[in-house]
Amino acid sequence: MEKWALNHPELGLIELQAGYDSDFLELDPTWPEQPKENEEIIPVTAESGMKERFSALFSNPAIRARILLNGKVLHRLSTINSARYLLQDSVKEDKLTVEDAGLDRSKPHLKVTSNIFNDVLEVEFRQGSEIVLFDPPAGSRGAKRREAMESSTLKRVGYPILAGLGKGGWAIAVIILAPFVSRFVKWLLSFLPDFDISLPSLPALPQIHLPTPSLPQIDLPTPSFNIDINLPELPGWVVLMLDYSKIWVPIAIGIVVGLLALRNYKKSEATKRAWQEKHPAKAPVRASAAAGNDAVRQREKQAAEDVREEE
């Protein structure tokens, strides 16, 4: 099971757990459903290649997730999508809201970023303008991404730019690949024989001529305006950008996303330092996921045993 954790100085321990059914059934026998018998799981690590990851995507069971606050489950997710989740005191069953328009962003919530393989890449705590990034668990895809981004400023900006390009990259792909696809289709059609299909002619429909009334013609004077405005000629680069807006607009979006991600990272580090200065006696902000989650696991197991004894 993959566990993300953040020790908030006021709210407490915030966690996101991601794993398979068997992982969660050890913590909570009531959720999710019982896994299938002899269900095999292809192990996937941060170092696995694309072939193994695609094979696991289609062969492994769905990856589920839970969001907890001080050991209490707030959200249970059947799949992991990039979305925002409010840290409220109520259980939400499969309430996936992509950038939920009804979510009050002034209230504390989590913003989860994932990829097509259901890997959690980044988890952010947000409350109004406050942004704090979770430290990814060791060995996860998010940790590998964070290490790569921290290795150089270029990668820190470049990775989010690539993510931004992915949102509009289909437009670039269509523009670039359209000529090649068109030529390939024409090449395939060249092997087909020519068909001359003559459809039978339909009988002519009867023509109906109705009298048209003759209305009086009124000629009104029309004013003539002759305004000659000499506008300056557009520069060549402006004309080029107007002609290829479908290419540069996604690139511009990607650059903006990259710069915002860099700004959010700096704000996150500044907020963590402020937390540590304001609450020096409390536990470190960068909570140990193993220690925090072990305590939660013990509490959950004890609660499950109490439920069995009552039954």
Image (spheres, grey):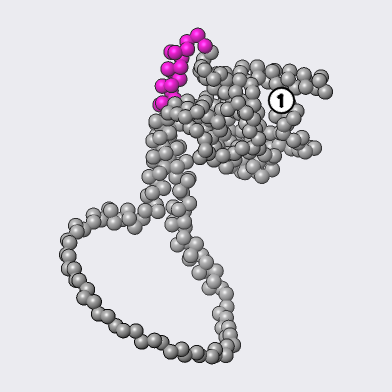
Placement of the C terminus among the 4 image quadrants:
top right
- Looking at the rendered structure, the kind of residue marked 1 is Leu
| Left or right of residue 149, residue 215 in this image | left
Which residue lies under the disc numbered 1? 27
Residue in view at x 45 percent, y 37 percent: 159
Magenta residues, start to end: 265-282
Q: Main secondary structure of the magenta part?
A: helix
Q: Position of residue 11 (x, y in %)?
A: 54, 20
Circle 1 Cα neighbour tier, 10 Å, few/some/many (<14 / 14–19 / ≥20): some
Q: Position of residue 84 (x, y in %)?
A: 53, 35
Taking the magenta stretch, the answer to whether it contains residue 278 is yes
Taking the magenta stretch, the answer to whether it contains residue 128 is no
Q: Position of residue 104 (x, y in %)?
A: 50, 33
> Compared to 224, does 205 lie above or below?
below
- Of residues 226 and 292, the one nearer the viewer is 226
Res 216 → quadrant = bottom left
| Left or right of residue 164, residue 27 in this image | right
Placement of the N terminus among the 4 image quadrants:
top right
| Left or right of residue 289, residue 253 in this image | left
- Of residues 143 and 51, the one nearer the viewer is 143
Residue in view at x 80 percent, y 22 percent: 308
- Of residues 236 and 125, the one nearer the viewer is 125
In the rendered image, the residue lying farthest to the top is 281
Residue 222 shows in this picture: yes
Q: Secondary structure at mark 1?
A: helix
Residue in view at x 46 percent, y 17 percent: 275
